[in-house]
Amino acid sequence: IRLVLLLSLPLLGTGLVVGLLIAILQATTQIQEMTLSFVPKILAVLIVLLAATPWMLSKLSTFTIRLISELPQIMK
């Protein structure tokens, strides 16, 4: 569970921050366009996903290797 939270934190945090900034912009300018909040969040999350993919794969592969190596001890 800790690994899932750690891996999802950059993506969810980015979506939260960008969504908050867009909401402040919309409240300030009184523009209530749905795509104005959706498109920037998707683009920001995609950029962070591309940047964080090597780190995420490293964490996942380390976890998988450790799980497979400890499998005989777990099966006892």
Image (cartoon, rainbow, N blue to C red):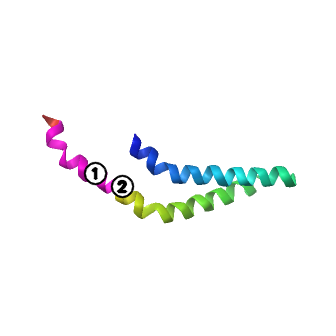
Which residue is most to the right? 30
Say which residue appears at 24% left-offset and 50% top-offset: 66
- State which region is magenta: 59-74
In the drawing, does residue 70 fall left or right of residue 42?
left
Quadrant of image for the C terminus: top left
Judging depth in this view, the residue of 19 and 43 nearest the camera is 19
Would residue 15 be counted in the magenta stretch?
no
Q: Is residue 33 visible?
A: no
Q: Amino acid at mark 1?
A: Thr
- Mark 1 residue element: helix
Q: Which residue is mark 2?
A: 59
Split into 4 quadrants, where in the image is the N terminus?
top left
Residue at (79% x, 55% y) in the render: 25
Which residue is pictured at 41% across the width and 60% down the height?
55
Is 44 left, or right, of 23 in this rendering?
Answer: left
In front of the other: 52 or 32 = 52
Sequence order check, earlier mark of 2 and 1: 2
**Residue 57: where, in percent of width, then height?**
37, 59
Which disc, if any, is residue 23? none
Residue at 86 percent across and 55 percent down: it is 29
Q: Position of residue 59 (x, y in %)?
A: 36, 55
Is residue 2 positioned above or below 46 on the image? above
User: Of helix, strand and loop, which mostly describes the magenta segment?
Assistant: helix
Give coordinates of residue 5: x percent, y percent. Answer: 46, 44
Identify residue for label 1.
Answer: 64
Left-right relation of 65 to 58: left
Q: Are marks 2 and 1 in contact (CB under 8 Å)?
A: no
Q: At label 2, which amino acid type do we have? A: Lys
Which is closer to the viewer, label 2 or label 1?
A: 2
Element on which disc 2 rests: helix
- Residue found at the very far top of the displayed protein: 76
Left or right of 46 on screen, residue 64 = left
